Image: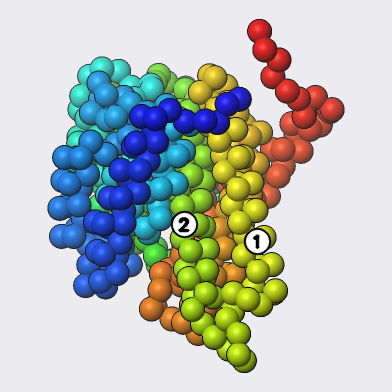
Amino acid sequence: MDFTITPEIDDMRRRISRFVEDEILPIEADRANWDEHDNIARSALEPLRQKAKAQGLWAVQMPKSAGGQGLPFTAVAVCYEEMNRSIFGPVVFNAAAPDDGNMRVLEQVATEDQKSRWLAPIVAGEVNSSFVMTEPHPGGGSDPGMMLTTAKRRGDDYVINGRKWFITGAADAEHFIMLARTSDDPRRGLTAFLHAADEPGFQIERRIPIMGPEEHGGHCEIVYEDMVLPADRVLAGEGLGLRVTQTRLGPARLTHCMRWLGLSKRCMEIAKDYAQNRHGFGVRLSERESIQIKLGDLAMGIEMGRLLVMKAAWEIEQGRFAKKEVSMAKIHVANLLHKAADVAIQINGARGYSKDTVLEWIYRYARQARLVDGADEVHQMVLNRHFTDEDREFWNWDVAG
């Protein structure tokens, strides 16, 4: 594993960094540019997106043939970290969840006709999308095998019935990837479907209030009642829903971590700047050993997270699922983000708890990081299962050749 980057990737990283500094942070600093859900208002977002497109910074994760920049996954890690120096960065570059993961899975498993209809508008930024999997108790959550939403074959169509919740981005989405049960087969019982927001049988029952700031479209509870979808809406093939989720969720978990590293660095940046300028009892805060220990510990944690993320990204580039590596990165970086926000608030004191900085935004956002795409405990169980199966081979080195 060689984590050096090419001059071309470094140029992309630097251009993204300048764009965030010069274009996005000034927009973020003016609360008039925020919407009622603590996200960037659409009126402020669209001009930034046009500038990002014009500068060749749009959808860096997608192949050039699909309208992106064609970066390899390790390069995506480098760029996403820079994008999320701003809380609004990823959505400006069309690199935010859930569109990011949805574009990636559609590019990998959709037919050419499906890509033209369902993928291309998302890549172009013309529509938003949503991934519809999680259900209220006793339905499927971290365990998709518990899924209760059904898709029953009726001639050339499927009839969908069920309830989903905490579906990110649903209120603003026009394109949906939805998982439903088509049989009781434990491995091939789920199927993924494509549908639009305006089709009969689909209803958003409520936008669920949450503690943190929201993505565009919030987190919604959805009801399917006798929705009829033709067979050409099946994604990847009947019974291959688990394959779709595995294809999507592994890299999506890792891209979350890439972005969270950027937010963690922003927390440290705000804390460092304040500590260097705030005096108390005759000394700067930054001269106090307790502050130095806190910031040094955070710096180490961020670097550990970067290495875990890059190792997992490299594994995925080799064509592997990288399940262990993704779980390790997900656990560490999610907890790191929460810690970074907490430490930065503590150093800033009342200022950190106020809305004078974005620290309180990041703190509220960070608590969900340990839940989304698998709670800490689920990933710890995954790691234990790998250790049980592999014993000392859990820790190994790739051998050249």
Taking the view exactly as shown, the residue that stands out farthest to the bottom is 281
Can residue 140 be seen in this snapshot? no
Instruction: Tell how many labels.
Output: 2
Figure check: 212 above or below 228 = below
Query: How packed is label 1: few (under 14 Cα within 10 Å), some, or many (20 or more)?
Result: few
Q: Which one is closest to the eye, mark 1 or mark 2? A: 1
- Label 1's element? helix
Mark 1–mark 2 distance (CA, rounded to whole Å): 17 Å
Figure check: 20 above or below 274 = above
Q: Residue at x 70, y 74 (%)?
A: 289
Q: Percent from the top left, x then y, of residue 150?
A: 43, 36
The answer to whether residue 237 is left or right of residue 337 is left
Nearest the eye: 231 or 61: 61
Q: Which residue is mark 1?
A: 296
Q: Percent from the top left, x then y, of residue 148?
A: 49, 41
Quadrant in the picture for residue 108: top left
Quadrant in the picture for the C terminus: top right
Q: Percent from the top left, x then y, of residue 215?
A: 35, 56
Q: Residue at x 37, y 59 (%)?
A: 87
Residue type (three-letter) at the residue carrying disc 1: Gly
Q: Which residue is mark 2?
A: 263
Figure check: 5 above or below 41 = above
Nearest the eye: 334 or 233: 334
Q: Earlier in the sequence, mark 1 or mark 2?
A: 2
The answer to whether residue 361 is left or right of residue 201 is right
Query: How packed is label 2: few (under 14 Cα within 10 Å), some, or many (20 or more)?
Result: many
- Label 2's element? helix
Quadrant in the picture for the N terminus: top right
Q: Residue at x 66, y 33 (%)?
A: 324
Can residue 334 be seen in this snapshot? yes
Nearest the eye: 43 or 298: 298
